[in-house]
Image (tube, rainbow, N blue to C red):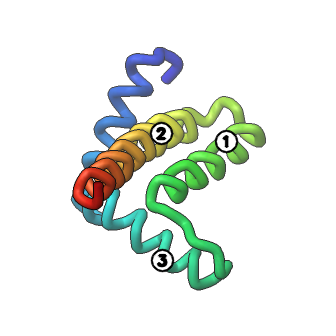
Amino acid sequence: MSDRFAILDAARAAVTRREQTYGAPEDNFARIAAFWTIFKGVPFTPGEVALMLGLVKYARAANEPSHADNYVDIAGYAACAGELEAQLAAAMDEIAEATA
């Protein structure tokens, strides 16, 4: 799979498929963030989890550049991170407006 559109289509399918198995990304990454926060003693957000899981895929791609799954997952994690960070920003804006 070397075509960028095929990679993005596969990422979209993977995100949808994984949601059926693991639940909504915001819930799944929030659970992971809670575990990482407990383990490291440093707070993590769901968006940061998505970005760091993408970093895992970058490290794997560095070892095996021809393995297409890594690029599909990087695209999927990036899309989830973007969505999660936008949700966080919107929630922060709502809080700011409510307390102004």
Which mark lies nearer to you, 1 or 2? 2
Residue 2 in the image, given as x and y percentages of width and height = 52, 18
Mark before the other along the chain sequence, 1 or 2: 1
Res. 18 visible in picture:
no
Q: Amino acid at mark 1?
A: Tyr
Task: Locate residue 22: give its quadrant.
Answer: bottom left
- Residue furthest to the front: 100
Left or right: where does residue 41 sit relative to residue 48? right
Q: Nearer the viewer, residue 68 or 33?
A: 33
| Element under disc 2 | helix
Residue where numbered disc 1 is placed: 58
User: What whole-number distance in Å separates the C-alpha atoms at marks 1 and 2?
Assistant: 12 Å
- Badge 2 or badge 3: first in the primary sequence: 3
Query: Is the Cβ of the residue at disc 1 closer than 8 Å to that at disc 2?
Result: no
Identify which residue is drawn at 64% across, 74% down: 42
For label 2, the crowd category at 10 Å Cα-Cα, with few meaning under 14, some 14 to 19 and many 20 or more, is: some
Q: Position of residue 100 (x, y in %)?
A: 29, 54
The CA span between labels 2 and 3 is 20 Å
From the viewer's side, name the closer residue of 19 and 44.
Answer: 44
Q: Nearer the viewer, mark 2 or mark 3?
A: 3
The reply to whether discs 3 and 1 touch (Cβ–Cβ < 8 Å) is no
Q: Residue at x 46, y 17 (%)?
A: 4
Q: Secondary structure at mark 3?
A: helix
39 vs 55: above or below: below
Q: Secondary structure at mark 1?
A: helix
Front in this rendered view, residue 35 or 89: 89
Residue 27, quarter of picture: bottom left
Q: Tell me the residue that label 3 is attached to.
A: 34
Q: Residue 78, which numbered label?
A: 2
